[in-house]
Each structure stands twice: as C-alpha cells, then as structure tokens.
Image: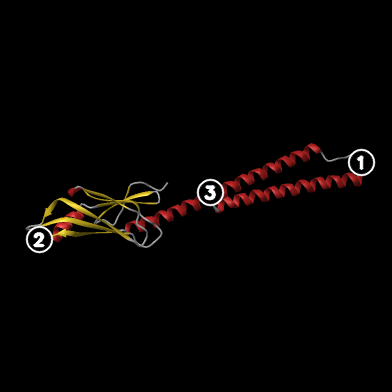
C-alpha cells in the first residue's frame, strides 16, 4: 500500500515539475521576445502539447490514487469481515448443551430434556434444531437470545430400558449421538455434543 501511495505522490511531483518547467519556458520566451523587440512568439502548438502531456500525467496520477484507495478499502473490508467471522466462531463454539432425564425410574427413561445455553455476547441463535438419530428425536426450538437458555422435552418411544445399566451410562450414550444446529446471522453451524469445534454448514455471504 505504501508503494502505491509513493507512486501516486511521485506522479504528482513529476507533473508539478513539468508544469513549472513549461510555464518557465513560456515566460522566458515571452520576456526575450519583448526585450529584443523582434518578431517572436511562443509556439502555441508546443504549449498545447505540453499542457496535454501534463494533463495526461495528472490523469495517470488520479487513476493510481483511486486504485490505491480502492485497494486500501478492500483490505479494510476483508480485515473487518475476518474479525467478525472469528468473533462469531468463538461465540458459536461456546454454546453449551445438557441432557437430563425428566421422566424416569429404575427400569426405564421415558422422557429427556435438552437444555441449550447461548453465552453472553452479540449473537442470538436462530433456527435451532436438536437431534438424536439413535432414538429418532428431532426437535426445533425458538430463537435464544445472548445470555439466555432454552430447553425442549423429548418423549422416548419406546422408553429406554435401563434395567441392568446405570442411568448415567444411558445418558452418555444419548449425548454421543446428539447433534445441535443453529444459525448466527447468515452462518449455519452444527455442533456435536462432545466436540467444541464447529461443523460449519454455510459461510458468511
């Protein structure tokens, strides 16, 4: 970027030098003619040619300056977009999930609750969906504002029989199959329960 600006400044300097030289030559010619009182005049065509050349340099300088400004603005937009994407990704990675049995006894789990917490920040979660394919659960949720939590209750049909197994082990098996999807701005993200990394489905426009 500095080289672009230096080039623009150099072009303007050359144009100024040329213009000054042309004006000096014209003034000197005029003074010489007046002093000598002879038939003498500065060539109009030569002056016009120099003016055209100087104008051309000015146009080139303006184009270079515009290109440098455009490049700088583009780099600024790219940097801003990358910063926003990074901030969004960190926020999405901190969304948390919890599974709790809400209807169970020693023999079976008949219902579970899935809690989703959106961390404080600037991004609400939209189009939230949780799924556990192993038990054919797929539920949609309302938007979740930053700093808030929401949950959904899911019936297990048929109930998961826990006779002979610990309830915690059964829940861990469900957690391993849990998938969360949500949207932040125009980015669709997916999270697995035990993975902090995001499976991005779409990129920012």
In the rendered view, how is the structure colored?
secondary structure
**Of pointers 1 and 2, the one earlier in the residue sequence:** 1
At horizontal 33% and vertical 59% (from top left) the residue drawn is 118
Q: Residues within 10 Å of mark 2 (few under 14, many from 20)?
A: few
Q: CA distance from mark 3 to mark 1?
A: 56 Å
Mark 3 or 1: in front is: 3
Q: CA distance from mark 1 to mark 2?
A: 123 Å
Query: Does the CB distance between marks 3 and 2 fall below 8 Å?
Result: no
Where does residue 124 sit, x and y in percent of width and height? 38, 56
Q: Residues within 10 Å of mark 3 (few under 14, many from 20)?
A: some
* Residue at which label 2 appears: 106
Q: Is residue 150 above or below residue 27?
A: below
Where does residue 167 sit, x and y in percent of width and height? 13, 60
Disc 1, SS: loop
Q: CA distance from mark 3 to mark 2?
A: 67 Å
At horizontal 53% and vertical 48% (from top left) the residue drawn is 71
Query: Does the CB distance between marks 3 and 1 fall below 8 Å?
Result: no
Where does residue 80 sit, x and y in percent of width and height? 47, 54
Along the line of sight, which residue is nearer the eye, 78 or 152?
152
**Of pointers 3 and 2, the one earlier in the residue sequence:** 3
Q: Is residue 72 above or below residue 47?
A: below
Along the line of sight, which residue is nearer the eye, 201 or 68?
201
Mark 1 or 2: in front is: 2
Disc 3, SS: helix
* Residue at which label 1 appears: 38
* Residue at which label 3 appears: 71
**Of pointers 3 and 1, the one earlier in the residue sequence:** 1
Mark 3 or 2: in front is: 2
Where does residue 76 sit, x and y in percent of width and height? 50, 53
> Is 71 left or right of 89, judged from the image as shown?
right
Q: Residues within 10 Å of mark 1 (few under 14, many from 20)?
A: few
Q: Residue furthest top?
A: 45
């Amino acid at each position: 970027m500095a080289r672009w600006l230096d080039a623009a400044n150099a072009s303007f300097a050359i144009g100024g030098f040329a213009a000054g030289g042309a004006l000096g030559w014209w003034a000197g010619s005029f003074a010489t003619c007046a002093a000598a009182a002879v038939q003498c005049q500065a060539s109009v065509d030569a002056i016009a040619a120099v003016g055209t050349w100087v104008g051309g340099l000015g146009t080139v300088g303006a184009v270079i300056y515009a290109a440098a400004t455009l490049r700088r603005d583009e780099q600024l937009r790219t940097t801003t977009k990358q910063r926003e994407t990074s901030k969004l990704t960190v926020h999405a990675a901190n969304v948390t999930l919890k599974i709790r049995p809400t209807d169970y006894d020693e023999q079976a789990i008949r219902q579970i609750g899935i809690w989703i917490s959106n961390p404080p920040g600037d991004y609400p979660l939209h189009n939230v969906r949780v799924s556990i394919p192993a038990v054919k659960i797929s539920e949609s949720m309302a938007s979740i504002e930053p700093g808030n939590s929401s949950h959904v209750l899911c019936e297990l049909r048929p109930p998961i029989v826990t006779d002979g197994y610990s309830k915690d082990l059964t829940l861990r098996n469900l957690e391993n199959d849990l998938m969360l999807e949500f949207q932040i701005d125009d980015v669709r993200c997916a999270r697995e329960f035990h993975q902090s990394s995001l499976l991005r489905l779409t990129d920012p426009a």
